[in-house]
Amino acid sequence: MSQNTFDGVRTAIIANKVDGIVREMTNTLLRSARSAVINSARDFSCAILTDDDQLLTAAEGIPVHVFGAQLQAQALRAAHPDMREGDAYLDNNPYVGNSHAADHTILVPVFVDGEHLFTAVTKAHQADVGNSIPTTYHAAAKDVYEEGAVIFPTVKVQTNYENVDDVIRMCRTRIRVPSQWYGDFLAELGAARVAERRLKELVAKYGVETIRQFVTDWLDYSETVMAKAIESLPAATLRNTGRHDAFDPFLPDGLDFGVRIDIKPDQGRIDVDLTENGPNVDCGLNLTEATTRAAVFGGVFNAIPARVPKNSGAFRRVVVEMNEGSAVGKPKFPHSCSVATTNVTDRLINCVGAAFAQLGEPYGVAEGAVGVGAGYAVLSGRDRRTDEDFVNQLCITANGGPGSAYADGWVTYGVPCVSGLMYRDSVEIDEIKMPIRYKHLRMVPDTSGAGKYRGAPSFEFAYTPTADPISVIYPCDGQIAPSKGVAGGEDGARAAAWLEDADGTRSQLPNTVAMVLQSGQTVHGFDASGGGYGPPLQRDPRLVLEDVLEGWETAEHATATYGVEFIDTPDGLAVDDAATERRRS
């Protein structure tokens, strides 16, 4: 970055303006989409890429969606070197840049006076993409053919601002609830066109040369910030391992993987080596190149105590090595990547972030809760209220965030791949859009991974059909291997789920579930919780007291786990300092 030409004030102003454009895209898509997984859970992201296929900004985009979007732009350029104004492209190809087949991505090249300057990107997780079973997480699929989704490798869907009707008719014919998909498709297109208009206005205000200089300066500045953050780290080689639960019968041994991280502060660089991991597995748990890179970047950003812009400039300082044909790397066609955005991705994010805790405070982070379980199930069936089919993914769960060197885990973390950036469903919207009823939703005390800073607690919920049977499909992880604590912190609670019959009898559900829930039956789900950071006996007793008063901990569990004694006073419960000191010593 040349200090002679760098204008910090101008760069900051324009950087905030392009972030504002992404937020306007986000609001447009959120308010105009039809499926609840998009307009209630916010399972989508928006981004702006440069003309040379670098991620410029994604504002609050979900990391697993946007940290690989530049790969999709590269694929677009390779397939369509003659892009023109008014074009729009649909991409969901997991083998060349996309996250997984369920993430339909719209890419709109933005031209000013015939010159390609940006590419606007909207990516939304669809409620259905035509899989062989009604779910977008087909964990059991041995390959992409069994998975069943229609793959669109950067296919043109608009030319001169007019729809290419052949492609749209293909989708409407193949996808289970076509009107819902088409509404979401139009919402994505609309959000991308909003970006196109706003970017043209931005260029008109500042001029092409100033905007080109800004792009160079902003990415170079981001690289410099990242380099300085790495230069402040101690030189080290870190190794860590992760494990995904066994999925019977198609992944009976589970999936073990490892990571090597070389921190090179003298070069301002981090090298991440994934090449020792095994080959693709014959099910839908394989990662894509985009999700592998996103997981590594996400884990690194979680672990280092620095505020770094999340764009391709910062990415330059993290070198990722991976194998082609590896479950934790690049997939080899036709292996299925149906669940590539979560499960193993979540485990890899945790593995990378937790590795940095080996450096001691203030580095690293515990493992966040995993488990796309019953609270993330895809439900489908016939709704007698409308006499129409329905399909949608729930996002009613919370999942506990990890403790860090600075703070307790985020309560509504979701799972590591979204890091709290998705919303929890509205109960009322879910019950309007689907023929289900929620029986209860509640936090569960005494479930946090204990630590100097604790993980966030588990969450429990239950739902049942209102009348007719409904299909319930999900691929839960975390019922066997918990989210690990670090630096002396304790592991989080494991996930679980039960099926309750009409007579009240209960049976525990396995990790992978594909069943028909009958009228009178209820699914009970229990989230995993986040791991703790640091020894529990080092937790500030005043924080422990606050946890008890807020209901996160019972007094008995707090005393047993954190060594804090309490006394009743005229003003209420208080810490017994002398008794606490004796117990802790």
Image: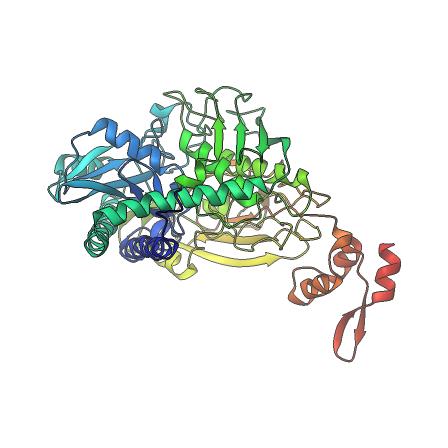
In the displayed structure image, the side of residue 397 where residue 50 appears, left or right: left
In the displayed structure image, the side of residue 471 where residue 273 appears, left or right: right
Name the quarter where the N terminus is drawn. top left
Name the quarter where the C terminus is drawn. bottom right
Name the residue rendered at 36%, 21% in the picture: 334
Residue 134: x %, y % from top left: 36, 38
Q: Nearer the viewer, residue 218 or 1?
A: 1
Residue 511 visible within the image: no
Name the residue rendered at 34%, 24% in the picture: 145
Residue 322: x %, y % from top left: 48, 24
Q: Nearer the viewer, residue 139 or 525?
A: 139
In the displayed structure image, the side of residue 431 where residue 248 appears, left or right: right
Residue 170 visible within the image: yes
Residue 261: x %, y % from top left: 58, 31
Q: Hey, which quadrant is residue 185 in on the image?
A: top left
Q: Hey, which quadrant is residue 136 in on the image?
A: top left
For this orientation, the residue located farthest to the bottom is 570
Residue 34: x %, y % from top left: 28, 52
Q: Nearer the viewer, residue 312 or 337?
A: 312
In the rendered view, how is the structure colored?
rainbow
Q: Nearer the viewer, residue 168 or 201?
A: 201
